[in-house]
Image (spheres, coloured by chain):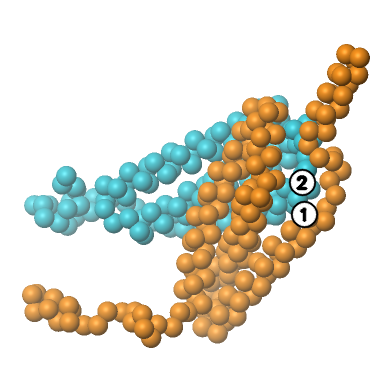
Chain colours: A orange, B cyan
């Protein structure tokens, strides 16, 4: 028992970091998890948004201001990229569940396809979001109108 | 603290293994993860489409949108399926990376309770706006 432990201790550690070649398959797997965890945090933002809307106009406007600000927009962008990656790689996992794409080169091809499609979907979503002119116009407009009306009434 | 599955105890392997987990229905977690993932695909596409089209929506237009039965129902389904999927996924992450049995159990319980609470808050909010 102690002899085998001694032998084990003398063995070199794996992976050898100096000569380590990263694999796409392990990288996509780790990223899938990381994105899953990030998306769980994103769910928190969705809950905040719904609770704010349920608690009233002030809370909703405060959250809207945060989300449409630079930090909020950055978070939304990260959320969308993580979402599309997790979605596409999840579909890759479905193929594996059905016993497909198990050959290394196919797993790699599908991995590159996941990155390409996720990037494309993220780009397309933000292109739509940024070029989309909202029908309802900016928030607060209703508030502004009501203030103007009140002022008009006061005069 | 000495736990049931401690190897140093005077218990037989069978006694240590009893009550610790599934025998015969261990694939439940795997299946549930796949089913919620499958359900999440259309729900998430609907959600992102809605978010983009709700850009710039003020309080009134947002609550009016969410009060539509179709949107409220899809939003509740989105919350249930997503939270279920998140709980299953985070469970695996905790089980994989936390090796202290006590901390693992504590974190699993806390994670599940927190997600359950958040999901309930979200569903209540949707219903409050919609009804």
Residue that numbered label 1 is attached to: A129
Return the x and y of residue B92 as percentages of the image width and height: 41, 56
Foreground residue among B44 and A18: A18
Residue at mark 1 shares a chain with residue at mark 2: no
Q: Is residue B94 visible?
A: yes
Residue that numbered label 2 is attached to: B55
Q: Residue at x 40, y 82 (%)?
A: A20
Q: Callout 2: helix, strand or loop?
A: loop
Q: Quadrant of the C terminus of chain B?
A: top right
Mark 1 touching mark 2, by CB under 8 A? yes
Position of residue B23 in the picture relative to residue B70 (left or right): left
Q: Residue at x 59, y 39 (%)?
A: A47
Q: Quadrant of the N terminus of chain B?
A: top left
Please give the chain letter of the residue carrying mark 2.
Answer: B
Q: Is residue B64 visible?
A: no
> How many circles with numbers are drawn on the protein?
2
Q: Where is residue B58, by image quadrant?
A: top right
Q: Residue at x 86, y 18 (%)?
A: A150
In the depicted structure, whether residue B7 falls above or below residue A8: above
Return the x and y of residue A6 as percentages of the image width and height: 12, 78
Q: Where is residue B74, by image quadrant?
A: top right
Position of residue B98 in the picture relative to residue A123 (left or right): left
For label 1, the crowd category at 10 Å Cα-Cα, with few meaning under 14, some 14 to 19 and many 20 or more, is some
Return the x and y of residue A148 as percentages of the image width and height: 87, 24
In the depicted structure, whether residue B37 falls above or below residue A120: above
């Amino acid at each position: 028992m102690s002899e085998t432990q001694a032998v084990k201790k003398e063995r070199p550690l794996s992976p050898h970091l100096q000569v380590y070649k990263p694999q796409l398959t392990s990288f996509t797997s780790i990223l899938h998890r990381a994105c899953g965890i990030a998306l769980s945090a994103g769910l928190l933002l969705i809950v905040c948004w719904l609770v704010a809307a349920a608690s009233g106009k002030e809370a909703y406007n405060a959250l809207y201001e945060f989300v449409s600000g630079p930090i909020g927009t950055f978070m939304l962008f990260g959320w969308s990229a993580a979402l599309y990656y997790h979605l596409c790689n999840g579909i890759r996992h479905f193929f594996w569940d059905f016993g497909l794409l198990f050959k290394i080169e196919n797993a790699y091809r599908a991995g590159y396809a996941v990155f390409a499609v996720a990037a494309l979907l993220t780009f397309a979503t933000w292109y739509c979001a940024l070029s989309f002119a909202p029908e309802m116009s900016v928030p607060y407009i209703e508030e502004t109108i009501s203030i103007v009306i009140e002022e008009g009434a006061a005069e | 603290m000495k736990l049931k599955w401690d190897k140093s105890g005077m218990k037989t392997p069978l006694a240590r293994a009893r009550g610790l987990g599934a025998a015969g229905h261990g694939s439940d977690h795997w299946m549930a993860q796949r089913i919620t993932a499958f359900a999440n695909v259309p729900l998430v596409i609907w959600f992102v489409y809605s978010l983009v089209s709700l850009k710039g929506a003020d309080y009134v237009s947002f609550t009016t949108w969410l009060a539509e039965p179709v949107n409220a129902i899809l939003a509740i389904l989105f919350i249930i399926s997503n939270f279920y999927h998140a709980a299953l996924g985070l469970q695996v992450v905790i089980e994989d990376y936390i090796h202290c049995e006590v901390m693992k159990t504590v974190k699993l319980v806390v994670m599940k309770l927190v997600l359950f609470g958040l999901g309930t808050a979200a569903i209540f909010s949707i219903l409050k706006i919609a009804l």
